[in-house]
Amino acid sequence: MADDRSFHSPSLGPLDFPRVVDEIVAMMDADPKAEYQLIVGTDSQTYHKAVEYVTAIVVHRVGKGGRYFWRRSRERRPASLRERIWREAWLSYEVAQWLIEALRERQVLGFHLEIHVDVGRAGRTRELVEEVVGMIIGVGLPVKTKPEAYAASTVADKHT
């Protein structure tokens, strides 16, 4: 898949990734004493021969609301549910790394970043929870699963 860093904002429309970072930094600069959480999650929808992945970046100003940005990519349909869930987790990790790098370059500190994966202890994905969570923890990021994984199961899902 090409490295397409095009995102969308419900209030601003299409944005490239540097503009998403500008918006995040501006939000944090507007209230520097607030606590911020950056959450990345991906959901997908399968079609006959393809799958659409939607990755969301949620910027939560704790106790004071938030904003989100999302991107869509379309790929060949994976052979299995396991492969699709792993791809969702990897896309979230990839976008989280973009964010970490961009914010470090701008010397932005004081935020918590976590990954939300669209797996849970109930349903078809229950066998995948440990391995997907283990992969995210293994790369050094906090992770949440359903029902707490709202960036994937609610925000990204809204755009699939």
Image: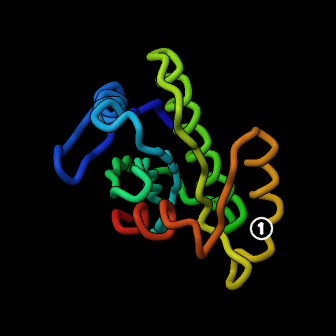
- Graded by Cα atoms within 10 Å as few (under 14), some (14 to 19) or many (20 or more), the crowding at tag 1 reads some
- Between 13 and 100, which is closer to the camera in this rendering? 100
Q: Confirm whether residue 48 shows in the render.
A: no
Q: Secondary structure at mark 1?
A: helix
Q: What colouring style does the render use?
A: rainbow
The amino acid pointed to by label 1 is Leu
Quarter where residue 94 is shown: top right
Q: Check disc 1 and report the residue beneath it.
A: 128
Outermost residue to the left: 12
Image point (32%, 38%), residue name = 31
- Between 113 and 76, which is closer to the camera in this rendering? 113
- Between 26 and 152, which is closer to the camera in this rendering? 26
Q: Confirm whether residue 103 shows in the render.
A: yes
Which x, y percent locates residue 101?
54, 23
Image point (52%, 55%), residue name = 41
Q: From the viewer's perspective, is residue 50 above or below residue 3?
A: below
Which x, y percent locates residue 123?
68, 84
Image point (32%, 34%), residue name = 20
Could you tell whether 155 is left or right of 117 in the image? left
Q: From the viewer's perspective, is residue 4 above or below residue 87?
A: above
Which x, y percent locates residue 39?
51, 50
Image point (77%, 67%), residue name = 128
Quarter of the image that includes the C terminus:
bottom left
- Between 105 and 41, which is closer to the camera in this rendering? 105
Which x, y percent locates residue 42?
51, 56
